[in-house]
Image (cartoon, coloured by chain):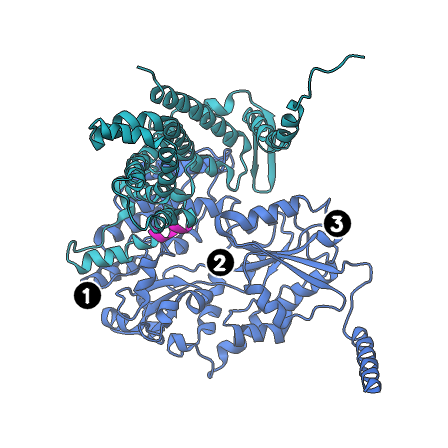
Chain colours: A cyan, B blue
Amino acid sequence: MKKSKGISYAKWGYIFITPFFIAYVIFTLYPQILTIYNSFFENYREGLKQVGPNFVGFGNYVKLFTPDKTGTINILKYTGNTLALWIGGAIPQIVIALLLAIFFTSYRLNIKGQQFFKTVIYMPNLIMASAFSMLFFTLFSNVGPVNQLITAAGWSEVPIDFFAYKGTVRGLICLMNFLMWFGNTTILLMAGIMGIDQSLFEAANLDGASSVQTFFRVTLPLLMPILVYTVITAMIGGLQMFDVPQVLTNGKGMPDRTSMTLIMYLNNYLGGSKNYGMSGAISVIIFIITGILSMFVYRSLTKKD
Amino acid sequence: MKKIIALLLTVVMVVALFAVGGGTAFADDEGKVFNIYAWNEEFKGFFEKYYEVPDGVTVNWIIVPSDNGAYQDALDAALLNQADAAADDKVDMFLAEADYILKYVDSEATQDITALGVTDFSNAYTYTVQAASDADGVVKGVSFQCCPSALIYRRSIAKDVLGTDDPTEVQALLDSWDKFNAVAADAKAKGYYMTASFAETYRPFSNNCTSPWVDEDNNLQFDPQIEAWIAQTDEFIQNGYTLTAGVWDDEKNVQMFADGKTMCFFGPAWYFNFCMGNAMDPDKGCSGDWAICEGPAAHFWGGTWLLAPAGSDNPTMLADIMNTFINDEEVCTALVANEAQFSNNQAVNAKFAEDPDYGNEFLGGQNDVAVFAGMTDNIVWENHTIYDQLLNEGLQTSLQEYYRGSVDQDTALNNFYLYVNEKYPTIVTP
């Protein structure tokens, strides 16, 4: 009889993580593979008539990258839109969140009523994005309160058509995404800063470091893992931006499709005609873009000098 | 005390026993659950008020709002699953709008209602029957309403611009597009808008198309009527005769208030009875300052059809409902008198049209049924395709950007083609 060398608890670890992997395979991995599989087929509905699925190889991808008659490769245009809309919201979001996180955690400032402020800045995130978007649509419509204010104050004779200009539509989308997410980011970054050993800040203080020096030499480097996580998750969310621009522009991405995001484009194919082939191909492209950009962000932020 | 309770229980039991015996019942082999798909509560209200459901049958309403095509998605899924569904889960009747009715009528998912016993269409308006007929003329459903769309004008503004608010005289001054366009200039000169939306006149044009949206090779084509609408709208926008708002936008709706500056709107009975709330506002509205006439072109807008899905397990009740809502004089009369509908029964409508005491308060006492009854003969249902709804919407929303000044016309049309390519891969765009 061979005596075991000790009791192994490792199997319990595997048992405990099994439910997650089962759920992951059924609800994420399998649909992902199915999406890739579908992207190689012509498969849509015309009226009540089902067309396909017929295998077309890379046909759907070729179609996506074929320029239209004005010479625009539309999927690249929508990728550009999506990135512009994300960056426009994400930069102020991260900068403001970082500032707020530092203010809230600073033992020097010691802000009173922190709980209240944290709740308030988190609040917009609790509203459904589509409801928030609808609210902005009504606020900024030609006969909405903002235009009434503008005409009443005499800033403009005629109402400003906020939805006729690329800049204003994109600006509104960025503003909404910023308002919705900066509270969430603040709380994440605060958790990150509070995880840093307080004695480091005290030591820096004793050595006569200024607040700015403390931030750049102590806080930021130690916060990097959380910051990278925040930026990458924000980017993945940003690439999947849908509800805010969809509701604000009623799915049109106006003007001239300059606020049409990749997912809105995908949704155009999916809604009504159930075009699983083309929307599958767009999904795969979004997946690849997300992978490349995440890698890029990760590399550039964690680069060692 | 016990005795009283026992007596009471006995009475209740006996009453219940008799109650079960009453009423009409259809053949025993038909289903006990009647499933109706709809996108809002409108018809449900009429159904519950005016249709007596046979004993033992439960009516099950599946109501899915039509926003973003959700209703059609749910309905399509149910119809495609019809053959495999359990008897009680089968769709027994569904509602469809004019904009997409052809998708269902021209498919195997619906069945011939004449075979079910709905055969008398003599009182129904021709176009409502045509709309529910497939390419071979097989009738698949009926409409409980008829929706001729009128020119709805502000009496006070018409007096100022045209010198009269009498519907017959106004009609004589606006019975062609040339006259309509000329009056638009007069209205502008007096500080009014002719219409309040760039797309207000879309339906009067598009309903009279002489060719369908796609030719036999599936090439997208613009009918001369659509081109005429674009030309008119270009002129109206450039000259400030109309606004850049869409037909359902708030910007248009505020024009219905008493201080609004717009003379003309287009719409059927349901539009001025249910969608012109601003005009009916007790403080800021102008109820009574309105009237209707046929306008430059006969057309219709909307309307709800009851369609018969293939494979329903309640064919007798299905046919009975359809007959009730087009041929039952009492029910059709109630629809006009109580529900502000223009019924799909010519005999009933004729009674109201001739009744000197009948009038619509909102229209300053004008007999709207009489006006509509005179318009129906000119309405045609032809040159429709299963693509109509999205193509009509897509063209309007794409061109709206042009009218708002965001893009030039070529870009707007190109965006329309992109939209068509996304929605219908088989349509060939220019």
What kind of element bears circle 3? loop
Residue at 61% of width from left, 60% of height from top?
B142
* B245 or B366: nearer the viewer: B245
Looking at the rendered structure, the kind of residue marked 2 is Gly
For the question of whether residue A72 can be seen, the reply is: no
In which quadrant will I find the C terminus of chain B? top left
Q: Position of residue B309 (x, y in %)?
A: 67, 52
Check if mark 2 and mark 3 are on a common chain. Answer: yes
Q: Which residue is mark 1?
A: B190
Q: In the image, which residues are magenta?
A: A131-136
For the question of whether residue B11 can be seen, the reply is: yes
Q: Closer to the N terminus: mark 2 or mark 1? A: 1
Q: Examine the structure image and report whether residue A134 is included in the region drawn in magenta.
A: yes
Q: Which residue is mark 3?
A: B86
Give the overall secondary structure of the magenta segment.
Answer: helix
Apparent side of residue B205 relative to residue B79 in the rendered image (left or right): left
* B26 or A119: nearer the viewer: A119
Q: Which residue is mark 2?
A: B302
The span from disc 2 to disc 3 (Cα, nearest Å) is 33 Å
Q: Are marks 2 and 3 in contact (CB under 8 Å)?
A: no
Looking at the rendered structure, the kind of residue marked 3 is Ala
What kind of element bears circle 1? loop
Query: 10 Å neighbourhood of mark 3: few (<14), some, or many (≥20)?
Result: few
| Location of residue B324 by image quarter | bottom right
Residue at 36% of width from left, 68% of height from top?
B278
- The tally of labels here is 3
Apparent side of residue A191 relative to residue B382 in the rendered image (left or right): left
Q: Examine the structure image and report whether residue A125 is included in the region drawn in magenta.
A: no
Give the chain of mark 2. Answer: B
- Numbered disc in front, either 3 or 1: 3
